[in-house]
Image (cartoon, grey):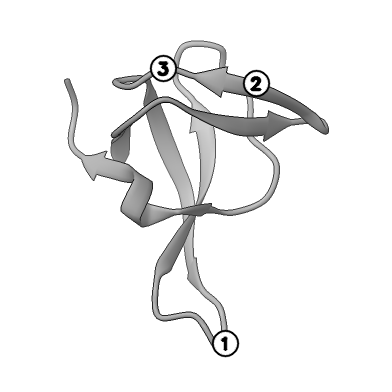
Amino acid sequence: MKVILKEKQPLSYKGIITWYDKGVEFEVLEEKTFPGFKDLFYKLKSVKWNIVLDGWNNSEDFEKGVK
């Protein structure tokens, strides 16, 4: 599944924080819920740069679908 970032925000790759613009497209590699959190989280891969981002990102920050 592909998702699109809703608003500009920082994401991490190999410990380096980079700001990604609204509308950047990512591929969801895995979905997960964590105990104590009601939200769904994504493990993401950048479509443009073909890199897997660090950690888990809140699904609330992304829209499902393709631009």
Check disc 2 and report the residue beneath it. Answer: 18
Which residue shows up at 49% across the image and 80% down it?
A: 37
Q: Amino acid at mark 1?
A: Pro
Check disc 3 and report the residue beneath it. Answer: 21
The numbered mark, 3 or 1, whose residue comes first in the sequence reads 3
Left or right: where does residue 60 sit relative to residue 48? Answer: left
- Work out whether 49 lies above or below 1: above
Q: Mark 2, residues whose alpha carbon is within 10 Å: few (<14), some, or many (≥20)?
A: few
**Camera-nearest label, 1 or 2:** 2
Q: Which x, y percent locates residue 48?
A: 46, 11
Left or right: where does residue 3 sit relative to residue 18? Answer: left
Residue 25: name its quadrant.
top left
Q: Residue furthest top?
A: 48
Which residue shows up at 59% across the image and 54% down it?
A: 56
Which residue shows up at 69% across the image and 33% down it?
A: 12
Towards the viewer: 39 or 32: 39
Distance of mark 1 from mark 2, alpha carbons?
Answer: 28 Å
Check disc 1 and report the residue beneath it. Answer: 35
Which residue shows up at 39% across the image and 71% down it?
A: 39
**Camera-nearest label, 3 or 1:** 3
Q: Which x, y percent locates residue 44?
A: 52, 40
Q: Which x, y percent locates residue 8?
A: 41, 25
Q: Which x, y percent locates residue 50?
A: 57, 18
Q: Are marks 2 and 3 in contact (CB under 8 Å)?
A: no
Residue 47: name its quadrant.
top left
- Work out whether 44 lies above or below 22: below
Q: Amino acid at mark 2?
A: Thr
Image quadrant in which the C terminus is located: top left
Q: Tag 1's secondary structure?
A: loop
Q: Are marks 1 and 2 in contact (CB under 8 Å)?
A: no
Q: Amino acid at mark 3?
A: Asp
